[in-house]
Amino acid sequence: MDGTHCREHLESIFRAGIEAVDPGEAVARAVKRQGDTLLVAGEPYLLKDYERVFVIGAGKAGAPMALAMERILGDRLSGGTITVKYGHTAPLRKVEVQEAGHPIPDEEGIKGAERISGIAGEAGERDLVFCVISGGGSALLVSPAEGIGLKEKQAATAELLACGASIEEMNAVRKHLSKVKGGQLARLCRPATVVTLILSDVVGDPLDVIASGPTVPDSSTFGDCLEIVGRYGLSGRLPKPVMRRLEQGASGTLPETPKQGERVFERVRNEIVGNSFSAVLAAGRRAESLGYTPLILSTRIEGETREVARVHAAIFREAVASGFPVARPACILSGGETTVTLKGKGKGGRNQEFSLAVALHIRGEDRIFFLSAGTDGTDGPTDAAGAFADGTSVDRGRALNMEAGRHLDENDSYPFFEALGDLLVTGPTNTNVMDLRIGLIV
């Protein structure tokens, strides 16, 4: 099979994964209306018991999730507001949409959080609040804690993104610099009934980590945040107001985020409506329909991007050489989210970097074709979702006077794949369940 057909198959398999985690359909599967009764994953909520019903939330998939709730609730929806990444919109009628910056928060995100907090703060005992949460919510739900300004939040976010911290570590710090993350939005909503619908973009679906768990008991502490700061040598790089807040919190002079068992969560329910496993499983089914034997390595892949890529490439080469762990023709899949420790000043994202690292390790192989892409349609601060790679990528780059190894060292994968015509550009998919990696062994 030639490279053109394999590339078409890679994209078809990727899009099948995206289709399986359509946010609107995920919400519609979880929430059904039968007359005056709402069933949320089978649990009934009688609409007659509530005076008002609101929809609030934040995340890249917020617009289609809110649109599904508008259709389900109909005239019983009183209103609402959500914050989404620029361009990730939908034609909503009753729920206001605030577009804002991601991954670095901006002033528009603060405006959106103020509107969300306003509805939460006004909700009463006979109100029902649906909160739609998806990946990107940590950056989009921006409400800096007392003594922290937007510039400090932006600087802290940039440092956390660059140092290679995991999403769990990043969000632990974000929660303790916020008025709404880490269960604090649930506190604002009390005494209303809260149902949070969550599209997971975090390995293992930890509720308190996804979008920094605005309606979930927080398992992290100020002390944990200081350990993270020390682990990555950030104490001299984070803004002074940020360090001062973390130190004061760890000493006990500031209140902690709400924890498991606190009364604030008595009328709160959190429900996962979609995740990486759903996408990878659907991608595998599409691969099978195209004639490949699918093998899912894991949907919980984490670690430094280039190291994880090296392991993937070794598995692909083993399949070519010995037929293990799966015989040709095969499709080897994985999901999850790796991290990049920035050392260069180039342009790219973790998926493009993953593909470039794989390309270096499969150079000369004519039976391996690969794609790594973000299910949200964006990879880092670029317009690409990811990139294709194969055994010819390195040499095709060299023919254009580009050294793949140098581009990798400079975190400069985007120009490399752009020159080869091997970027995958999908535009916003309005969903987000981490990354999808697909290796075809033909």
Image: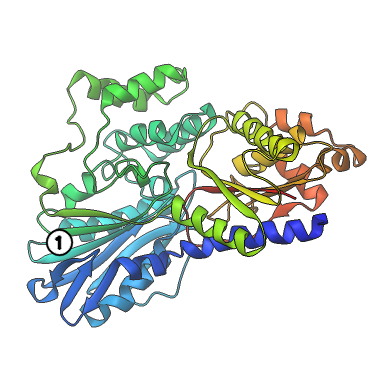
The number of discs equals 1
Determine whether 244 is above or below 160 in the image: above
Q: Quadrant of residue 202?
A: top left
147 w.r.t. 432: above or below: above
Coloring basis for residues: rainbow
Image coords of residue 433 (percent x, y): 46, 52
Mark 1 crowdedness (10 Å alpha carbons): few <14, some 14-19, many ≥20: many
Q: Which residue is mark 1?
A: 123
**Residue 250 appears at what percent x and percent y?**
24, 21
Where residue 253 appears, x then y in whole percent?
17, 23
Q: Residue furthest right?
A: 399
The quadrant of the rendering that contains the N terminus is: bottom right
**At x 76% / y 44%, what residue is drawn?**
415
Q: Residue at x 64, y 26 (%)?
A: 343
**Residue type indicated by callout 1:** Ala
Coordinates of residue 158 in the picture (x, y in percent)? 50, 34
